[in-house]
Amino acid sequence: MKKLFSIPLSVIILFLVSCSHKEIKVMPSLTVSNHSFSNYDSVKLNHLYLDLNVDFSNKVLKGKVVLDIDNSMGSQFLILDTKQLVIEKVQLEDSCNTPWSLGKEEHYVGQALVIEINKNTKKVAVYYHTIPSAEALMWLSPEQTSGKRNPFLFTQSQAILARTWLPCMDAPAVRFTYNAKITCDAKYMALMSASNPQHKNKDGVYTFEMDKPIPSYLMALAVGDIEFKSLGENCGVYAEPDMLIRSANEFTSLPSMIQSASEMYGEYAWGRYDILVLPPSFPFGGMENPRLTFATPTIIAGDKSLVSLVAHELAHSWSGNLVTNQTWDDFWLNEGFTVYFEERIMEKINGKDYADMLSTISLGELKMTLKDLMANAPGDTKLKLNLRGRNPDDGVSDIAYIKGCMFLKLIESKVGRQKWDNFLNQYFNAYKWKTVNTEEFLAYLQNNLLSLNPNAKINVNEWIYEVGLPSDCPNIQSRNLRNVELAAKKVNETKSLKGFDTTGYTTHHWLHFFRNLDADSIEDIMVQMDTMYHLSMSKNSEIQCDWYLLCIENNYSKANPYIEKYLLSVGRRKFLKPLYEAFSKTSEGLIIGREIFKKAESSYHAVSRNTVKEILQIESEE
Ligand code: BES
Ligand code: ZN
C-alpha cells in the first residue's frame, strides 16, 4: 500500500488509461468462410504458445495464448475465431496493449476477435478465460470418472470447437506448431496432443511441444488422475489407474499396427503414438489427436474385438493429420481414406477374412444410413458436402466414412493393389503437412493414376457429386459372416432359435445376426434370445446398443432398466443417437427417452447432448 502512494498519481492514471480496453474504431467487414472468421489469407499464423491454469473448482481455464504471426502483407487486423471465451486484454510484442473488439455472435461459429496489428507485429498475446459450459471442455465430477475420487477434464476440438477454449484461426486449412505450459493441482497429470510426460509432476506444471504443424481441430488437453503404461518402444497407454491394466491388455497389438501402417504408407511422422483411455462420457469412439489418440473405454471389450478403432485413429496419422481436409465439405478425404486404411491395417494383422468381416458390417451400415438420408436429406449423401451455414457436425455420417472408403476400394479393384498402393504413397508424400480439397485430390488422381490406366473406367463425378450409392459399388463377401446370414435365415423361417449355434461368435457376428433378423420374426424370439444369451445384461457396448435397439423397437420393456443404466453410463454419441431415436418414434417412448435424458444430461459432453436434444425435440440454449 505504502509503495503505491509513493507513485505520482499522474503515473497511475496514465497506467490505468493505457491498460483500459480500447475498441477498434472502424471494424473490418467480417465474413464467415468455411466456418471461420479468421483472415488466414492475409496474416500467416506460424506458432502458438499456450499458458493455462486449470481450475477444477470453478471449471475454468485461464491464461494466455501468444500467436507468432507473419504480417508481411501488412494487414491492419488479425482476426481470430472465438466462441464463449472471455477476453481480458490483448497485447502486441509482450507489453503494449492494442485495440480489439468482438464481432457479432453467429450461430455455430461464434464471434470474431478483431485485433489491431501493424506491419511489424510478430507476437500477439491474448489474455482470456473460458466459461464452465465451454463446448469443447468436459469437466467431469469425481462420480463421473472410473476411479470416483478425482475430477477429470478433457477437450474435444473437432470440428469447430477449439475456439471455445483458445482464440485461434479455427480452420483446418491453417497449420501451426505449438508449445504450452499447463498448470494444475499436483495430484493430476496433464496431457496434450504433443510431447507428453509419463509421470506425475511434483509441482503440477507441465510443458509441451508439438513441433510439427497441425490444424486447430487437433489441439487437445486432458487433465486428471492419469497413469502411463508402455506397450512398446514408441507407444503406450494412459488411463485412470483402475483402467490401466485392462486398457494395456486390450491394445497389445498396437506396436504391430504401427509397423504395418508404416510399411504400407510410409514412415510414421509423429514420433510417439500413445492412447489415452477416457472416462465413458467421451462423445466419440476415438479422436486422432496427434501423438495421443483419445479413446472411449467402450472399446475395451476384454476380447480385443473392437480394437479396429485404434487402427482407425492410428491411420489418421497419415490421412487427416499429415494430409488434411481443407474444409469440412471435404471431410471424406479425412475419414474415407482412414476407414480404407484402417481395414488395410486390420487385414495385415488379422487377415483378409477379418477385414472382409469389418467391411461387410460397414457396408450394411452405409446402406441403412443411405435409406434414411435419401428420404430425409438426399444432398447429404454426396461425398463432397455443402455445409455452408450449417454445423459441420452434420457432415459426420457413414457417407464420408463408408461411401468414401467404398470409392477408394473401387479404384483399387480397377487398377490393382500394387498400383493403388504406389499412388497412395505418392499422394501422402506430395501433400504431407498440407491441406487438400476434393477437387485437388481428383485432379491428382486423374493425372497420377487414372490417366495412366485408361481401362479403369470409373464415374468419378457420380461418386463425388451425386446422391446415393453408384451401382458399381464393390460388393463385399465375408466368409466369416456368411454362416451368420444362414443362421439368421433359419431363425427367420422357423421363428425359433432351435439349432442356432453361437460357437465362435464375437461382437461382429452378433451385430450381423441382429441386423439380419426379419422385423416380423424378432418379436417372437426376443424372450428366448434374452433367456438363452443374457443379452440385456451384456457388457459389450456394441452388442448392447444393437440389442437395446431391438428391445425398444419391439416393445420388449423388460430391458428398460438395462437400457436406462446404459444410457446413464455411456456418453458416446454413436450409441446414444440410435437409442434415443428409437424411443422418440412413439409418444410413450418419447416420454421414457426424455426422462432418461433428464437424468443423464449432465454426464454427456455438449456434442452428444446437443444431438440428443435435437432428437427429443428439446430446445437448446444456443
Ligand atoms: N475424427 C473422428 C471423430 C470426429 C469426427 C469428431 C468429426 C468430431 C467431428 C474420429 O477419427 C472417428 O472417426 N471416430 C469414430 C471411430 C471410428 C469410425 C472407428 C467414432 O468416434 O466413432
Ligand atoms: Zn476418423
Image (cartoon, rainbow, N blue to C red):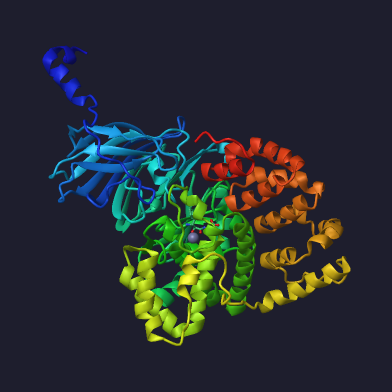
Give coordinates of residue 120: x percent, y percent: 12, 45
Is residue 128 shown left or right of residue 257? left
Instruction: Residue at 45%, 62% (x, y): give it.
Output: 384
Please indicate, yes or no, whether residue 252 appears anywhere in the rendered image.
Answer: no
Instruction: Residue at 79%, 56% (x, y): give it.
Output: 534
Compared to 134, does 317 lie above or below?
below
Is residue 615 shown left or right of residue 173? right
In front here: 587 or 265? 587
Give coordinates of residue 330: x percent, y percent: 42, 61
**Among the 4 quarters of the image, the one containing residue 126:** top left
**Among the 4 quarters of the image, the one containing residue 359:** bottom right
Q: Quadrant of the N terminus?
A: top left
Instruction: Residue at 24%, 43% (x, y): give it.
Output: 78
Is residue 613 shown left or right of residue 418? right
Compared to 553, does 310 lie above or below?
below
In front here: 1 or 343? 343
Of all residues shown, which one is farthest toward the bottom? 455
Is residue 187 shown left or right of residue 267? right
Please indicate, yes or no, whether residue 575 appears anywhere in the rendered image.
Answer: yes
In front here: 153 or 424? 424
Give coordinates of residue 579: x percent, y percent: 68, 49
Instruction: Residue at 47%, 45% (x, y): give it.
Output: 154
Give coordinates of residue 594: x percent, y percent: 68, 38
